C-alpha cells in the first residue's frame, strides 16, 4: 500500500511539473511578416488599373523560376519572359492564342496584356496581394 501511495504521489508530481513547463510551438508566428515571391504559384488578377474585372472572368499569371510568365488573359492563354531584380520587374515578348470572345472580354484582355508589357516594378501588400506597377503608375492587383 505504501508503494501505491509513493507511485501515486510521483505520478501527480510529474503531471504538475509537465503542466508548469514551458511549451514551444512549431507553428510559425503569424504576426511576423512573410516573405513573398513572384514564384509562389498561380496569381489571380482581381483588378486592372482600378477598373475591376468582368464578372466571372479569369485572369491568372504564373511566374516560373526560369524567367517565364504564363496564364490566362481572360479569353486566351498567354506567355512571355520576365526579369526581376529587387522590386524591378520587366515583362517582355508576350504572345497569346487568338480565340475570339465577347467584346468585353477582348477589351479586358487587351488592357491586361498592355499593362503587363508596361510593368516596371512589383510589391506585396501586408495581406499578400501582388501589385504590378506600370510606367504610367497603373496597377494590376492579384492574389492567390
Image (tube, rainbow, N blue to C red):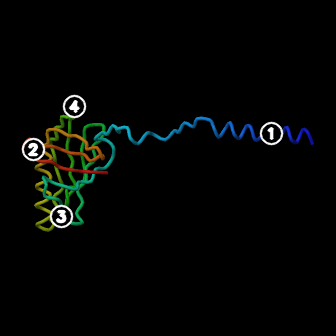
Task: Name the quadrant containing residue 17.
Answer: top right
| Residue at the disc numbered 2 | 137
Question: In this image, 62 relative to 91: left or right?
Answer: right
Question: Which of marks 1 and 4 precedes in the sequence?
Answer: 1
Gap between marks 3 and 1 measured at Cα = 70 Å
| Residue at the disc numbered 3 | 54
Disc 2: CA contacts within 10 A as few (<14), some (14-19) or many (>=20):
few
Is label 4 in contact with label 3 (beta carbons under 8 Å)? Answer: no
Question: Which of marks 2 and 1 precedes in the sequence?
Answer: 1
Gap between marks 4 and 2 measured at Cα = 19 Å
User: Mark 4 or 2, which is nearer the eye?
Assistant: 2
Front position in the image: 91 or 88: 88
User: Mark 1 or 2, which is nearer the eye?
Assistant: 1
Is label 3 in contact with label 2 (beta carbons under 8 Å)? Answer: no
| Residue at the disc numbered 1 | 9
Dot 3 falls on a residue whose secondary structure is: loop
Query: Residue at the spot x=18%, y=60% of the render?
Result: 53
* Residue 43, x across and y down, in percent: 28, 50
Task: Name the quadrant containing residue 54.
Answer: bottom left
User: Mark 3 or 1, which is nearer the eye?
Assistant: 1
| Residue at the disc numbered 4 | 85
Dot 1 falls on a residue whose secondary structure is: helix
User: Mark 3 or 2, which is nearer the eye?
Assistant: 2
Gap between marks 3 and 2 measured at Cα = 22 Å
Question: Which of marks 3 and 4 precedes in the sequence?
Answer: 3
Vertically, is 111 above or below 68? below
Amino acid at each position: 500500500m505504501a508503494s501505491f501511495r509513493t507511485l501515486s504521489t510521483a505520478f501527480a508530481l510529474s503531471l504538475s511539473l509537465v503542466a508548469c513547463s514551458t511549451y514551444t510551438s512549431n507553428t510559425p508566428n503569424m504576426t511576423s511578416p512573410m516573405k513573398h515571391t513572384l514564384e509562389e504559384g498561380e496569381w489571380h488578377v482581381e483588378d486592372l488599373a482600378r477598373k475591376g474585372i468582368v464578372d466571372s472572368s479569369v485572369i491568372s499569371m504564373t511566374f516560373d523560376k526560369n524567367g517565364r510568365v504564363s496564364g490566362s488573359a481572360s479569353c486566351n492563354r498567354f506567355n512571355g519572359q520576365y526579369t526581376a531584380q529587387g522590386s524591378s520587374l520587366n515583362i517582355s515578348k508576350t504572345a497569346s492564342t487568338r480565340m475570339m470572345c465577347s467584346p468585353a472580354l477582348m477589351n479586358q484582355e487587351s488592357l491586361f496584356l498592355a499593362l503587363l508589357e508596361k510593368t516596371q516594378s512589383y510589391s506585396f501588400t501586408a495581406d499578400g496581394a501582388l501589385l504590378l506597377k506600370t510606367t504610367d503608375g497603373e496597377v494590376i492587383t492579384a492574389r492567390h
